[in-house]
Amino acid sequence: MTELSIKLLSTVPGLPPILQTIHLLGLTMLMASAVMMNLRLLNLAGRGQQLQEMLQRLFPWVFWALPVMLLSGLPFLLARPQRYLNNPVFAYKAAFLCLALILTAALWLAFRRGRIQQQTWLVKALALVSLSAWLMTAMSGRWIAYADYLFWPG
């Protein structure tokens, strides 16, 4: 699989920027939905919309963006695993992503079970941490390429 990824990325004209563009479009779709949901749960945006309606409309966008991002980012990881697995910023991204996914899944389950009828302090706390985790995932993902500037050789 590694050789196939390397071959595809190096021989298919324009494939790396096409995959990066798809990855960024997935990130845009995911972040727009996750940020709006969490801001609504924090009662900072979308107050004119019913909470249940907004969550029902936006959760699918989050869950559809994830496979788009996985499929568009995986070839880069498979082509050069050492570039990512030895990069401390990638470890931060993975940790923030896991936290964001767990919190988003918890909010989704609470929503599906009808437990998010109002913005309680627990829902607001989950939304705030979820929003922070998604933002840190996006930021650390962007900084992966710049790890050399962040961590000086020792």
Image (cartoon, grey):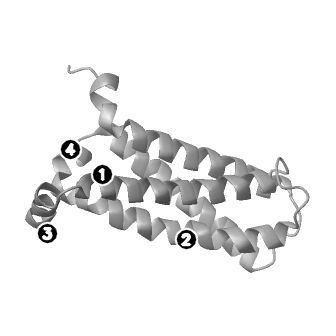
Quarter of image, res 50: bottom right
**Residue that extends furthest to the bottom in the rendered view of this protein:** 113
For the residue marked with disc 4, what is the amino acid? Arg
Up the image or down, 154 lies above or below 91; here it is above
Residue designated by label 2 = 63
For the residue marked with disc 2, what is the amino acid? Phe
Q: In terms of sequence position, does the residue under pointer 2 or pointer 4 come before the other? A: 2
For the residue marked with disc 1, what is the amino acid? Pro
Instruction: Find numbered disc 3 in the image and state the secondary structure of the residue it sits on.
Output: loop
Instruction: Find numbered disc 1 in the image and state the secondary structure of the residue it sits on.
Output: helix
Whole-percent x and y of residue 70?
Answer: 38, 64
Residue designated by label 4 = 83
Q: In terms of sequence position, does the residue under pointer 4 or pointer 1 come before the other? A: 1
Whole-percent x and y of residue 85?
Answer: 24, 48
Question: Which residue is found at the position 35% from the left and 53% from the top?
Answer: 20
Quarter of image, res 147: top left
**Residue that extends furthest to the front in the rendered view of this protein:** 13
Between the C-alphas of marks 3 and 1, the distance is: 20 Å
Q: In terms of sequence position, does the residue under pointer 4 or pointer 3 come before the other? A: 3
Q: Is 49 positioned to the left or the right of 150 in the image?
A: right
Between the C-alphas of marks 1 and 2, the distance is: 24 Å
Q: Is residue 54 visible?
A: yes
CB contact under 8 Å: marks 4 and 3:
no
Between the C-alphas of marks 4 and 1, the distance is: 18 Å
Residue designated by label 3 = 1
For the residue marked with disc 3, what is the amino acid? Met
Residue designated by label 1 = 17
Q: Is 133 positioned to the left or the right of 23 in the image?
A: right
Q: In terms of sequence position, does the residue under pointer 3 or pointer 2 come before the other? A: 3
